[in-house]
Image (cartoon, rainbow, N blue to C red):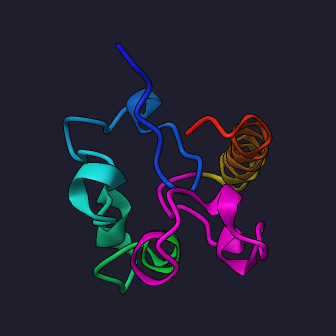
Amino acid sequence: MKKKISCCGMICSECGRYQNACEGCPESNGKTYWLEYAEESTCAIYRCCIMTKHYPHCGKCTAFPCNHYDLDDPAKTVKENEAAHRRQKELLKQREMYNDF
C-alpha cells in the first residue's frame, strides 16, 4: 500500500486508527480522529497549511517548524508525541529537499 502522508508529515497509513476511526487529513479535510479530545473542529496545522496558506505540506512554509508543532496528540504519551514530532519534521525536511510530495 502506498503511504498516505498528511500536510504535517504524519504518515496516516501507519496509524492504528487509519481507516477505522480516521480517513487521514487529506480525505477528511483536517478532521482527524483526535479532535474528539480537543476543542477544535479542524486540525490547526491543516487549517494553517492547506486552508490558509495553500501549501501542499508544511515543509513549503518559511516558518516551518512553527508553534503548531508544539501541539500534542492527547491520545499519545509525551514520549510518543516527541517521537512523532521528530519524525514528522524529518520527513518534511526530506520531502522539501527532494521536492517529493
Residue 50 quadrant: bottom left
Quick check: 14 above or below 7? above
Residue 22 left/right relative to 15: left
Q: Residue at x 46, y 49 (%)?
A: 6
Quick check: 31 above or below 24? below
Image quarter hosting the N terminus:
top left
In depth, the one of 42 and 38 nearer the eye is 42
Quick check: 11 above or below 9? above
How many numbered badges does the structure rendering display?
A: 0
Instruction: Tell me which segment is drawn in magenta.
Output: 50-76
Residue 45's spot in the image, x, y percent? Answer: 52, 71
Does residue 46 belong to the magenta stretch? no
In depth, the one of 13 and 38 nearer the eye is 13
Image quarter hosting the C terminus:
top right
Residue 61's spot in the image, x, y percent? Answer: 69, 69
Q: Residue at x 56, y 57 (%)?
A: 57
Q: Residue furthest top?
A: 1
Residue 34 left/right relative to 11: left
In depth, the one of 60 and 65 nearer the eye is 60
Give the main secondary structure, helix, strand or loop, of the magenta stretch: loop
Residue 2 quadrant: top left
Residue 99's spot in the image, x, y percent? Answer: 68, 40
Q: Residue at x 77, y 37 (%)?
A: 94
Q: Residue furthest front?
A: 99
Does residue 71 belong to the magenta stretch? yes
